[in-house]
Amino acid sequence: MKVEIDTFSGYKIYPSKGRLFVRGDSKIFRFATSKNESLFLQRKNPRKIAWTQVFRRMHKKGITEEVAKKRSRKTVKHQRGIVGVGADLQSILAKRNQTDAARATARQAAIAKAKQDKKAKETAKTKPKAPARSGATAPKVSKQQAKGTTTGGGKAARY
Amino acid sequence: MIGLKGTVNIIDNTGALVVECVNVLKNKSSHGHASIGDVFVCVVQKARPISLTSAGAPSSGSTLTSLKVKRGDVQRAVLVRSKQPVQRPDGRWIRFDDNAAVLVNKKNEMIGTRIGGVVSSDLRLKGWGKIVSLAPKAI
C-alpha cells in the first residue's frame, strides 16, 4: 500500500481515495478531493492558495519544531609559534606565563647586568687610554730634552 | 464512454487521425457506450494523406504505402484512453485528457504496427495485452 501525495495541495492520498488524471503530455496528477482537482483545472497557482503545503512551505508556516540546518561551524584555532629565531611556541608560552614577580626580578637582573657591563666597558676604555697617553708624551719629552741640551749648550758658549 | 457520433483520436500508425463511432459492439445492443477496452465500429473522418512515396519511418511489416486507411473507411477500433474516469480494482479512478483508440480488424488484431502515446493499463485486464506491450507507456 502506497500513500500518494496530492499534486496540488500536498495532502496524503490513501488507497481508493481521490483521482488520477493523465494529461495530454502524459504527465500524471493526483488529486485527493474534487476541490483540489477543480482548482487545478481552473489553473490556480497552489503557491497562492493559503491552505496548500506549497504555500505553507514557501511562507514558512508551522515549522518551528523542525528548525532546518542550524549547524554552526566553529573554526578551531591552533596555537602556532613564529618561524625564526627564539620565538617558537614554547618560548612564547613561557614568556606569556611569567608571573609579575618573576618579570620584575628578571628586569632587575637585566638592569644590574647592564650596569655592570657599562662599568666594565668604561674601565676598559680608560685603562687602555691612560697607558697610551703616557707612552705618547714620553718620546716628546725626550725629544725636547734632547733639543734643549744641544741648543742650550751652544748658545751659552757664544756669550 | 463513447457512443454514437462520438469522435475519437486514433493513435496508431494506420494513417487515420479522427474517427467517428457508429456502433458499440457490446452485448448485441446497438446503444450503449464504449469504455476502455471495448470495441466499436467507426468511420474514418480524418486521415493522413496517402502518398505513393512514403517518407515515413520504416515499420517492421510495411507495404509501400504505410498508410492503411483512408477517409470514409469503416473500421473497428478499441478504446484505449477515455476522458470518463475508469475505476481500477484497487479503487483508483483514472482519467485521461482525451479519448483515443486503436484500429483493429475483425479478428481483434491490430491493423497498425505502432502506437504513439500513453495507453490505459485497463486494457491488460480486458485481454488487449498486445496493445499494452506496443504502447510506449501504459498508465
Image: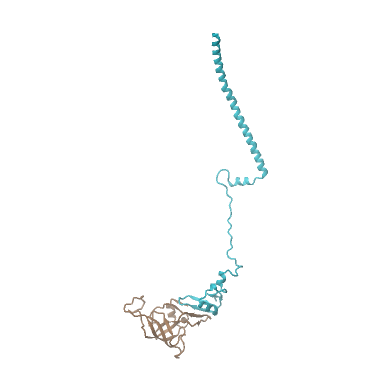
x and y percentages locating residue A159 in the rendered image: 55, 8
Identified at 59% across, 29% down, the residue is: A125
Quadrant in which residue A4 is drawn: bottom right
Q: Is residue B71 above or below residue A115?
A: below
x and y percentages locating residue A67 in the rendered image: 60, 66
Q: Closer to the camera, A109 or A151? A: A151
Q: Closer to the camera, B124 or B6? A: B6
Residue A114 visible in image: yes
Identified at 62% across, 45% down, the residue is: A95
Quadrant in which residue B51 is drawn: bottom left
- Which colour represents chain B? brown
Q: Closer to the camera, A81 or B105? A: A81
x and y percentages locating residue A97 in the rendered image: 64, 46
Identified at 43% across, 84% down, the residue is: B7
How is the protein colored in the picture? by chain
x and y percentages locating residue B26 in the rendered image: 45, 88
Residue B109 visible in image: no
- Which colour represents chain A? cyan
Identified at 43% across, 80% down, the residue is: B131
